[in-house]
Each structure stands twice: as C-alpha cells, then as structure tokens.
Image (spheres, rainbow, N blue to C red):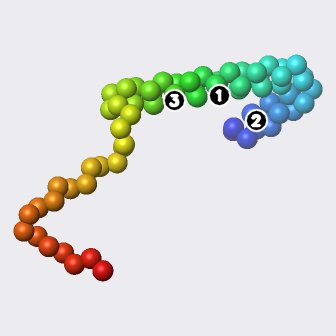
Amino acid sequence: MFENFFGQFNTYLLGHPAFLAKLKLLFWIKSWALMLLMGFFLYLIFREQGFRRLEAPPPPRQRGTYCFKA
C-alpha cells in the first residue's frame, strides 16, 4: 500500500520541481527545529547538573585494605 503511494508521489515530484523545492525547504526547517530542540534539552541537563564531569566519582578509599598493584 505504502509502496504504491510513494511510487506515485515520486512520479508526481519528477514532474513538479517547484513542489520538490518546497519539500526540501520544509525538510531543512524541520531538521534545524529538531537540532534546536535537542540543544535545548541538553542545556536543561547541563543547567541542572552543572558543567561538572558526567562520570561517577571514584569510590572512597577504605583504611586497612591493601591491594598489590603491579
């Protein structure tokens, strides 16, 4: 069903380059909007956590435990 629709739609686009240019512009706008949305959510994460390292801190050293490191 979808293959048939997309085949007809592609045939229509080949005959109407102005419509194809409009679709290209809409795709460009959509991609930039998604990038801005992603940047906004990354900003929210960094604002909440601060710009410190995102990895876990090392475990605290315990006294009385020794290990041999070669």
**Image point 76% across, 21% down: which residue?**
25
C-alpha separation, residue under disc 2 versus residue under disc 1: 21 Å
Q: Are marks 2 and 1 in contact (CB under 8 Å)?
A: no
Quickly name the residue at label 1: 31
C-alpha separation, residue under disc 2 versus residue under disc 3: 30 Å
Extreme residue in the left direction:
64
Q: Is residue 47 above or below residue 57?
A: above
Residue 20's x, y, as percent? 83, 25
Which quadrant of the figure contains the N terminus? top right
Q: Residues within 10 Å of mark 1 (few under 14, many from 20)?
A: few
- The disc, 1 or 3, on the residue closer to the chain's N-terminal end is 1
Q: Are marks 1 and 3 in contact (CB under 8 Å)?
A: no
Q: Residues within 10 Å of mark 3 (few under 14, many from 20)?
A: few
Q: Amino acid at mark 1?
A: Ser
Q: Nearer the viewer, mark 2 or mark 1?
A: 1
Q: Nearer the viewer, mark 2 or mark 3?
A: 3
Closest to the observer, 49 or 41: 49
C-alpha separation, residue under disc 1 versus residue under disc 3: 11 Å
Which image quarter: residue 62? bottom left
**Image point 7% across, 68% down: which residue?**
64
Q: Amino acid at mark 2?
A: Phe
- The disc, 2 or 3, on the residue closer to the chain's N-terminal end is 2
**In the visual, does 48 lie left or right of 11?**
left
Residue 38's x, y, as percent? 51, 29
Quickly name the residue at label 3: 38
Residue 21's x, y, as percent? 83, 22
Closest to the observer, 59 or 64: 64
Q: Are marks 2 and 3 in contact (CB under 8 Å)?
A: no
Quickly name the residue at label 2: 6
